[in-house]
Image (spheres, rainbow, N blue to C red):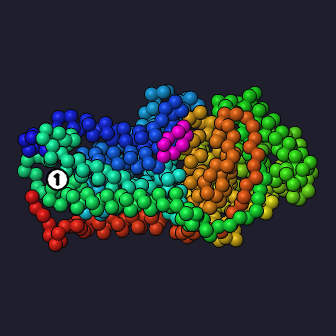
Amino acid sequence: MSRRPPGRSARGSGYFWWWICLAGGVLQAASVAWPFSDWSLPGMSAGQPSGFWQIVSLSMLVLALQYATRVGQAAWRGWVFSTAWLSGTFWWLFISLHTYGGLPAWLAVLAVVTLAGLLSVYYAVAVGLLCSWAPVSRTAQALLFASLWTLAELARGHWFTGFPWGAGGYAQVDLMAPWAPLVGVYGMGFLAAVLAYALASLISGLWRRLSTWMVSPVSLPVARPATGARSGAPGTRVQARVVPGLRDGWWGLVRTGLLLLAVGGLLLSMVGGGQAWRNLGQRGTASAGELRVWLLQGNIPQDQKFEPGTGIAQALSWYPQQIGLAVEAARTNPTTGPQLVVAPETAIPLLPSQLGAEFWKPLLGGLAGQAAGGTSALIGLPLGSMEQGYTNSVWGLSPGAAARARDRLELPGALGAGIYRYDKNHLVPFGEFIPPLFRWFTDLMNIPLGDFNRGGLAQPSWAVAGQRIAPNICFEDLFGEELAASFGSDVTAPTVLINLSNIAWFGNSVAIDQHLQISRLRAMELGRPMLRATNTGATAVIDHTGVVTHLLERLTRGRLEATVQGRSGITPYAQWTARWGLMPLWIGCLMLVLVIASLRSLGRRGGRTRRR
């Protein structure tokens, strides 16, 4: 035990825990996709997630909270952790703001840190409430922490249009894979938070017990509550309740260890156990046949993409050429040629009306000159007009639709009639729409087409070669509950998901790897293959279990040829989110918080409140 007089704080203890929170936040960011290729922690490699280190990083925050003595201090530590975590997760926004948007470097850095700091308020409030309402029972503390933390994640992901990039559950895409089709990314984050709290409680409890037996006065730096503080004061409550007293400390440690073993054992048994465990959430799905695809990656630099002499010329030449080659391959080998070729987001960087018949006639003519079962093309492009507004969209061109469009080519405004169309629903703030009061900010950036209209939710799928294709654009695949809105019925639910993206805005950064992990989790949640066609990477094929089966090297120009298996049936996650969205998670976490907060004496002997 420390020999310092009561009421004196350990010198430097605040800085110690500040650094712990900072390091934990950085580790939390790195656990989603390890950003370094030259060195790594055990079990981590470049671009890969680590559920283990995500739990460790979150337990570092919990330790800092357990040694807090005031609610405000705990909230501050939660804010520091979250700001470091979120800044380290989406730091690459700096590239789009500065390199391509033209903002001064200092202003771009300030914008990223400010965004992270504002989003971190959710987590600061969550840990503040935890330390205000923490019961004596360690199990109840873990559940309270996990519930409040999940509510903060939900709020960040949905309030004010939502920006859930880097949510802790994405780091669990491998460790907790069997849970994805059952509870989704936020449910996986809840389980990770329970484990993190149990791990931190076990460490702090053991340290407290061992430190009482040491001859020398060695202990973790801890700010002690002021002399005369009431036993019910927030700081005292946190320190007394989270770290068990000497009388019943061993029993508390045993219960915490059992909780850690029980939850951890369940996770490991599902990952490493029998096939029945691993496929529990996928047992309601089945094969819906095969689809042969080409996924195109143009690798057009972002600073050239909208330049007439460079990027636009490359796009208008290379993508139609590849579509023509796909048509020829299918004509030459009908049983092995591609049935679908996919070009990424804004692969055609101009409006259809800006291109004219000289561009469309050869492209549509090639597609139209096939039999009904020939090659179809899915192409990202902007649509609209100055009067009607613009959309970030996808056109689906089947042989029949291409023939009809070719015949109407000379009719003004009739080109798009009868063509399958998907319009992006969930837009990127500042990049695709301008939030209220922020027009001045976007005026500082040089980003073309920065204010789009929204498409509808749960837009119809596109029928291709016996499959129902559901496209989504860019970061729309972060919102699993919105993709699940199309899964209300197995008869109309998509059998294949396709993400069309342009991550060139963020350079050769970890954003590419992070987005790949996000797509993997969507595939697992919904029990569908996810095909990714991107400008610079990661162009990939992901099967319905989240396994990357085909991957094209990033920052190269080429095509990815693959045969994928469509899936029918509905996973539990898709079923309940299609009906209720994420409301069950909101309600479940809120109910846990209310029950635990109203029963603060949970775990006390005889139900009586101890007073110090």
Q: Quick check: can you spot residue 158?
A: no
Quadrant of the drawing holding the C terminus = bottom left
Instruction: Count the labels in the image.
Output: 1
In this rendered view, identify the residue nearer to me: 359 or 45.
45
Kind of residue at disc 1 = Thr
The quarter of the picture where residue 8 lies is top left
Q: Is residue 107 left or right of residue 249?
A: right
Residue at numbered disc 1: 236
Q: Is residue 38 left or right of residue 222?
A: right
Residue lying at 60% horizontally and 61% vertically, measured from the top left: 526
Q: Is residue 280 magenta?
A: no
Quadrant of the drawing holding the N terminus = top left
Q: Position of residue 140 (x, y in %)?
A: 30, 63
Q: Check disc 1: other Cα within 10 Å, few if <14, some if 14-19, many if 20+.
A: many
Q: Position of residue 517 (x, y in %)?
A: 56, 48
The quarter of the picture where residue 608 lies is bottom left
Numbered range of the magenta stretch: 43-50
Q: Is residue 103 above or below residue 200?
A: above
Q: Main secondary structure of the magenta part?
A: loop
In this rendered view, identify the residue nearer to me: 340 or 182.
182
Q: Position of residue 449 (x, y in %)?
A: 64, 41
Residue lying at 38% horizontally and 62% vertically, measured from the top left: 262
Q: Position of residue 151 (x, y in %)?
A: 40, 58
> SS of the residue at dot 1?
helix
Q: Is residue 151 left or right of residue 283?
A: left
Q: Quick check: can you spot residue 601?
A: yes
Residue lying at 53% horizontally and 39% vertically, measured from the top left: 45
